Structures are given as structure tokens and as C-alpha cells.
Amino acid sequence: MFDVAIIGGGPAGYTAAIRGAEYGLKVALIEVTPKLGGTCLHVGCIPTKALLFNAEIWDHLKHAAEFGIGNIGDAPTLDWQAVLARKDGIIAKHVKGLEFLMKKHKITTMVGYGRLTGPAQNAIHTVEVTSSAGEVSQVQAKNVILATGSAAKMLPGLEPDSSILTNVEILKMDGVPKSLIVIGAGAVGMEFASIFRSFGTEVTILEFLPRVVPVEDEEISKEITRLFKKRGIDVNTGAKVEKVEKTETGVKVSYTDVNGKPQVKEAEKVLVGVGRAGLTSNVGVEMTKIELDRGLIKVNEAQETAEPGIFAIGDIVLGLPQLAHVGAMAGMIAVAKIAGRKFRPIRRVRIPGCTYTEPQIGSAGLTEAQAKEKGHEVKVGKFPFAGNSKATILGSHDGFVKIVSDAKYGEILGVHILGPQATELIAEAVAVMELEGTVEEMMHTIHAHPTLAESMLDAYGAVEGMAINA
Ligand SMILES: Cc1cc2nc3c(=O)[nH]c(=O)nc-3n(C[C@H](O)[C@H](O)[C@H](O)COP(=O)(O)OP(=O)(O)OC[C@H]3O[C@@H](n4cnc5c(N)ncnc54)[C@H](O)[C@@H]3O)c2cc1C
């Protein structure tokens, strides 16, 4: 008998398992694949960031002479198999790390497909676990957490293969493609576009909406579009994909462009990055009171579903962004509730959103447009990395920090960063927003010199028209 049985061993599930054990709960973690880590570790966050780091080094090598490094700039070569091997090594290391953590915390892990069997009987839930050999066993627990994650959505009628790719196939290609069409300019599409452009691929982006990274502040979308175009990426917004066909040499994508004109683009490969569907069918949800909306599960602020004793966390949850850190925090909240401990519900405006492109995007809180819609009297401060000495040292001057604040008390409503290490810099913004710091307080917070973080200080100053370096 367990206090909690968790179905799914991705970042949401394994984080819930560890924190649950830290609270003294008896935890079972059920994962259908033989390796913990989920999408994030195997085909998501970690492998993409590994490749992005390779791409960054490659980009630096292109300018080796500028850094005084000779005899390399002329003809550096890329060993794609070594790139993949390094990525796989990173994954393997962290799979081992997770196995160690499970043992350390005395968490019972089971390899098998978990399915709910209906509501609790006498306050005890039964989860059916089917092994790959078809053997069925049962796990009993006072609570169940669903953490089954998501899979890439496909365009109607398409199946992924060696030329029509999702995040899974693109991470195990034999080599760098000559040309790639990316359908969808959310974080996943933009990151792969960035990686392969660095490696020399001819990249075309087709995005249906009027702008790329549409959840970001408009100025960020505009500037990264300009910078991607400068890198030679063919960015098309307002593009409605009509048909994807296979050809002898790859793929052909027919689409209607922003002016309503039919267009055709051919490439070696196409990546479909049009969002992710929650894996909520075939897990017994229909045998419970759990409410679904477009395949995602409705939960309250403690991650509880409508069925008593059953929680949902991670990519299957309705109304939260599908991000590893959101799933992990939701897992910590669910087990805190189960253990009777204090928790803070997830607040949407305190979630960092990161896109690890070149240059990177890091943002949190309201965009300028959202803040105005909500009726705030908005005061904006903007500071370009061109004025930051560390950015000059790094040779990375593109982008800016934008602070969206409320004029009345200087409340920080949103922070939007495009530029070097934006995904690291955003952590400071989230912390200060979480602690309800103000623009004035941040203007008096000492930031080390020379750092990229100083650009935050200058951006807060810019809200009051008092940036030092611009
Ligand atoms: C290319 C790409 C890049 C990404 N980059 C980032 C990033 O940089 N930062 C970020 O925060 N997010 C990123 N994400 C999103 C992130 O990967 C997901 O938000 C995160 O993995 C969700 O965690 P999860 O635990 O809910 O689900 P998953 O990670 O999908 O894990 C679910 C697990 O449940 C298992 N499972 C499913 N059904 C069952 C069942 N019935 N029984 C037993 N086990 C089951 C699956 O095998 C899987 O291991 C990226 C996603 C992609 C595709």
C-alpha cells in the first residue's frame, strides 16, 4: 500500500516522487519506458539544449580569427555522429542520476503502462500496471498522480518518418539536412530552426499566426524575426500550410502566404512543430469524474482533479504552459497537498518562459499589450545589449531587456529579454517579481560589473529615464 502512485516518470512525475519521499510519503513511480526522464530528458529540453550548445560553439568557430584563434577558421569540420554521441552521453548520465535518486529516496519504480481502474474503493485507489510482456499487476495507493505527459501533434493525414519529422525523429537524423522547412514558430520550431541554421541548413519557417513566438511580447517577436532573417532564415508568418507531400528528394509543402497567394516550397526535411497533445486517452480517465477539455485535465490550485484522490501534473494539465519546470512545480504542489504541507499554487505570471535560440529569449509576467489590456498605466524601460560591456566581450550585442511596470507603485508586471544568456537572466526577474520587488528597489540593487545582469539594472533605470549606459 502506497501513499501515492505516480503514473509517468518525466520531470513532473519524478519530481513529485522525490519531493513526496522527502515528505516521508511511501511512493510508487510507474513508467512505461525502461528509462526515467520523459520527453524532457530524452527528446525535449536536454537534447535540444545540448545541440544548441554545439551550435553556439560552431558559431564562435566561424569567427575564430576575430578572437585571435588561427588555423581553425578556414575549415573547421562538423562530426555529426560525435554531436549526437555527446547528446546521448548527456542523456545517459542523467538517466543514471535519476535511477540513483530513486534508490536514495527509497521510491519503488515499476516499468509498465499505468491505467486508472475507476474511483477509490474505501479510499484506496487501484492502478493497473501492464508490463511490456503483457503481464498485469495492481498497485494500491491512497492517492494517484497522473503525469503521462504529451506527444507532438501531427498535421491531419501525416505520419512521421525519415523526412516528415517531429521532435523525436529530428534528434536522430543521419546528418545535417541541406534544407529544412519548419512548420510552427513556437519554442520548439524556433529552437530547431536556430540549431540547423547554425550548422548550415537552408531553413524556412512557416507560421500561421501573424508573428513568431506568439506568446512573447510583440517587440521580441519583431526583433527575433529581424535577427533570424539576418542569419539567412526565411521567416514566413501568416502562412497557412495546405499540404505536405513526399517527393523523391524530400518533401514539398504547399501553403497560402500572408497575401493569400498559393506558394510551394521544397526541402529535404520538414519539421512539424504545431503543438503537443496531452496523453490522456487510454489511461482510464473515462472511468472517473476527471474532467477533460480538448484532451487536457482540469485541476484546482492543488492540482486535484474532480475525482477525489487523483491529481494531474505536467503537460496534461489544462491552462498551464507545457514546460518542464511548470510540471515539476505542479508535482511538488500535489505531494505537498497529499502530505498536508504548505504549498503555493502556480501563478501564471510568475512562470519563466525560455526559448534557447540564438539569441535567446527569456520572459516572465505580462507583455506590454497584456498589461495595457488589464488596465494598468504602463511604464516601460528598455535597454539594448549594445550598451553592455560584457555583451561586447562576448561579441553578442543583439537584443534588449524590456521592463513592463505599473506607473503607480513601480510594480514589475513583466520582464522580456532577448539576447545573450536571456534564459539565465530571467531567473532574477522571476525572483524579484515573486518577492514583489519594485522598479525603484531594483534600481538600487547592486549588480556585479562586468556582467550581462547589469543590463537588468540599466533596464530598471530606463523605466525612470535613468539608464546609465544608454
Ligand atoms: C523539442 C522540445 C524541447 C523542449 N524544451 C523545453 C525546455 O527547454 N524547457 C522546458 O521547460 N520545457 C521544454 N519542453 C517541454 C518539456 O519537455 C515538457 O513540458 C515536459 O517534458 C513535460 O513533463 P511531463 O512529466 O508532464 O511529461 P513527459 O516528460 O512527457 O513525461 C511523461 C512520461 O510518462 C510516461 N507515460 C505516459 N503514459 C504512461 C502510462 N500510461 N503509464 C506509465 N508511463 C506513462 C512517458 O513514457 C513519459 O516518460 C520541450 C519539449 C520539446 C518537445
Image (cartoon, rainbow, N blue to C red):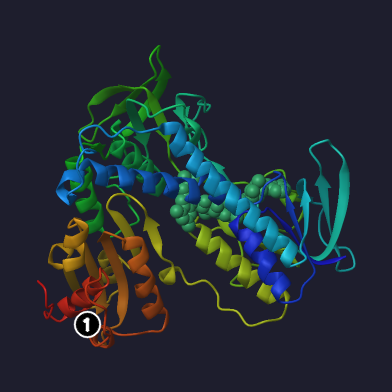
On-image quarter of the N terminus: bottom right
Q: In the picture, residue 206 is in which quadrant?
A: top left
Q: Position of residue 203 (x, y in %)?
A: 29, 33
Total numbered labels placed on residues in the image: 1
Q: Taking 42 as reference, is 263 left or right?
A: left
Dividing the picture into quarters, in which one does residue 163 lie? top left
Could you tell whether 31 is left or right of 180 in the image?
A: right
Task: Confirm whether residue 39 shows in the render.
Answer: no
Most distant residue in the front direction: 71
| Secondary structure type for disc 1 | loop
Q: Residue reaching furthest top?
A: 248
Name which residue type carries label 1.
Ala
Residue denoted by label 1: 407
Residue 426, percent from left and from top = 35, 68
Tell which of 204 and 41 is nearer to you. 41
Q: Is residue 327 above or below residue 67?
A: below
Q: Is residue 440 above or below residue 144?
A: below
Residue 306 vs 174, above or below: the answer is below
Residue 275 % position (x, y): 46, 44
Q: Residues within 10 Å of mark 1 (few under 14, many from 20)?
A: some
Front one among 431 and 358: 358
